[in-house]
Amino acid sequence: MRDSPNYRVVLDGELSLNLQMDGEPSNTIKVVERDAPTYTGQTTVDPDFSGTVLETAQKIVLSNITVNPIQVESVSNPTGGRTVYIGGII
């Protein structure tokens, strides 16, 4: 059963270990206490200049966190070149 790719082990507490899986270089796996609270904050973030911290430390995150792309616009300018606006046109 341990050779099965779907083999699961439930651990309590916190543990860091290196495993050799399928002949690949070892990976570090961190197991967090299963009674940890679930992250319920925002899961989609718009980038800004001040930064955003998602309070996920020591919590179980059940879905992906998405950081939206920064808007970039390129327009013609009077000298025949291009002007690029990062963060959108003002």
Image: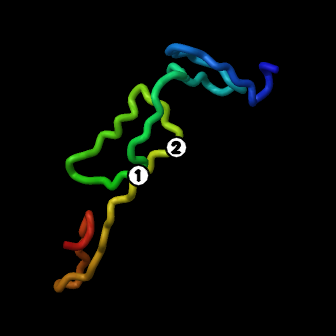
Amino acid type assigned to the residue bearing label 2 in the image: Ser
The front one of 83 and 56 is 56
Q: Which residue is drawn at 36% across and 51% down?
A: 45
Which image quadrant: the N terminus?
Answer: top right
Q: Which residue is drawn at 50% across and 15% down?
A: 14
Label 1: few (<14), some (14–19) or many (≥20) C-alpha neighbours in 10 Å: few
Q: Please give the label number shown on residue 44.
A: 1
View extreme (right): residue: 1
Q: In this view, does 40 lie above or below 33?
A: below
27 lies left or right of 88: right
Q: Please give the label number shown on residue 14.
A: none
On the image, the x and y values in percent for residue 87 come to: 26, 64
Q: Earlier in the sequence, mark 1 or mark 2?
A: 1
Amino acid type assigned to the residue bearing label 1 in the image: Thr
Label 1 residue SS: strand
Type of colouring: rainbow
Q: Is residue 41 above or below residue 24?
A: below
66 lies left or right of 17: left
Residue for badge 2:
63
On the image, the x and y values in percent for residue 18 come to: 57, 17
Q: Which residue is drawn at 41% across and 52% down?
A: 44
The front one of 24 and 8 is 8
On the image, the x and y values in percent for residue 77 come to: 20, 82
For the residues labelled 1 and 2, the Cα–Cα distance comes to 10 Å
On the image, the x and y values in percent for residue 59 come to: 44, 29
43 lies left or right of 53: right
Label 2 residue SS: loop
Image quadrant in which you'd find residue 56: top left
Which image quadrant: the C terminus?
Answer: bottom left
The front one of 59 and 65 is 59
